[in-house]
Image (tube, grey):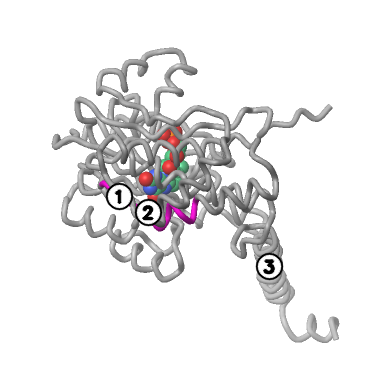
Amino acid sequence: MKELLFKIFPDSFIRFIFNKTLRAYTIYQSYNYDRKRYKKYSDSFLMKKQNELIGNIIKHYHVFEKGLTMPNTRLGFGQPKLIVLINECLRYIDLFGANEPQLKHAVAVIKEYENFHAENNFALEDNTLENLKKINTLNIEGPVSKQLVQSSEGYFKNVMAPFDEFSFSRHSLRNFKDLEIPMSSITEALEIAKKTPSACNRQAWRTYIFTDKALIQEILKIQGGNRGFGHLADKLIIVTSELGVFGHSFERNQAFIDGGMYLMNLLYALHFKKIGTCPLNCSNTPEKDKILQKLCSVPQSEVFICMIACGFPPDEFKLATSPRYDINFTNKIIG
Ligand SMILES: Cc1cc2nc3c(=O)[nH]c(=O)nc-3n(C[C@H](O)[C@H](O)[C@H](O)COP(=O)(O)O)c2cc1C
């Protein structure tokens, strides 16, 4: 059969077809491998595993951290979600105990929410109070959390400091004043960020800078994770990554890795230029992806990495604490 094929068709043609089929198959097989792993280990089906529960707890307490740092925190916000969070914490404690640092922080944020409403003489709903009682009776040790209060001067005071201090001084900002960022500051930040290393120096990142306020709002409405502060953004940067510079199944995630590295570098560069930023996820469903590509004039060959809401900070504002794990938890030294 093989010989017959080689007799009928030129060598190069057969090799071309063979390579194409083989590559298409390995791409299919590799995505299938990823798909199975994601289905098995992600928290999409929320079983009872520790990672799945704590991931959800962090995601849910962060909503309250953000809510408490908004330019205008709405009293009584998110009570149904608070009840979900409380019950997730209770479930976690029941299954795994109360020693996890992020679990303790979740409880601390719940208490901060309660205190914030008490200080503002706001009566929470009976159902919320009952659930708060359940978590309070557990007497989980640890301080009540307090979101950070910062001044614009303090926020940028370490931009020329050694890297450790500089890095610790960057926080996501969810409050912007009504002042235009000069385009030159953005391009200077882009000049710095382009030093990001990338696989074989292929520099797949692309950026789209939006200045039109109406278009920014249209895009942010679809993004969805900027309620309460997105309307204050002066500029919006969208970071994407070009798939065309990568090939074969084994490079299927490289666009996201290189794009993510660029994103971090750009966040630092903008902080260095004294521009406040909040990264905004582009974790899109296929439908949302297509809508955003069209709206943002992003070619189909590019994948979204992240959006960055940009603006100058007001004189005084709040920042979410977003505490990090001890490195002993996230790091393993292998002998
Ligand atoms: C890829 C990515 C997506 C994010 N998406 C959002 C978002 O949609 N809305 C939001 O308010 N914050 C978003 N954030 C900000 C995170 O909540 C924040 O980085 C995290 O809590 C750590 O806090 P820090 O940036 O102040 O250190 C995102 C951050 C990253 C890196």
Which type of secondary structure does the marked residue at label 3 adopt?
helix
Q: Is residue 35 left or right of residue 64?
A: right
Label drawn at residue 176 = none
Q: Amino acid at mark 1?
A: Gly
Label drawn at residue 79 = 2
Q: Is residue 259 visible?
A: yes
| Residue nearer the viewer, 220 or 123 | 123
Q: Main secondary structure of the magenta part?
A: helix
Q: Amino acid at mark 2?
A: Gln
User: Mark 1 vs mark 3: which is more N-terminal?
Assistant: 3
The magenta span reads 75-85
Which type of secondary structure does the marked residue at label 1 adopt?
loop
**Figure check: 156 above or below 235:** above
Q: Which residue is mark 1?
A: 76
In three-dimensional space, the C-alpha distance between marks 3 and 2, rounded to whole angstroms, equals 40 Å
**Figure check: 177 above or below 242:** above
- Asked if residue 78 lies in the magenta stretch, the reply is yes
Near mark 1 (Cα within 10 A), the count class, few <14, some 14-19 or many ≥20, is some
Which residue is located at x 23 percent, y 39 percent? 71
Image quarter of the N terminus: bottom right
Which type of secondary structure does the marked residue at label 2 adopt?
helix
State which image quarter holds ligand 1: top left
Image depth: mark 3 or mark 2 in front = 2
**Residue 133: image x %, image y %?**
48, 46
In three-dimensional space, the C-alpha distance between marks 2 and 1, rounded to whole angstroms, equals 6 Å
Label drawn at residue 32 = 3
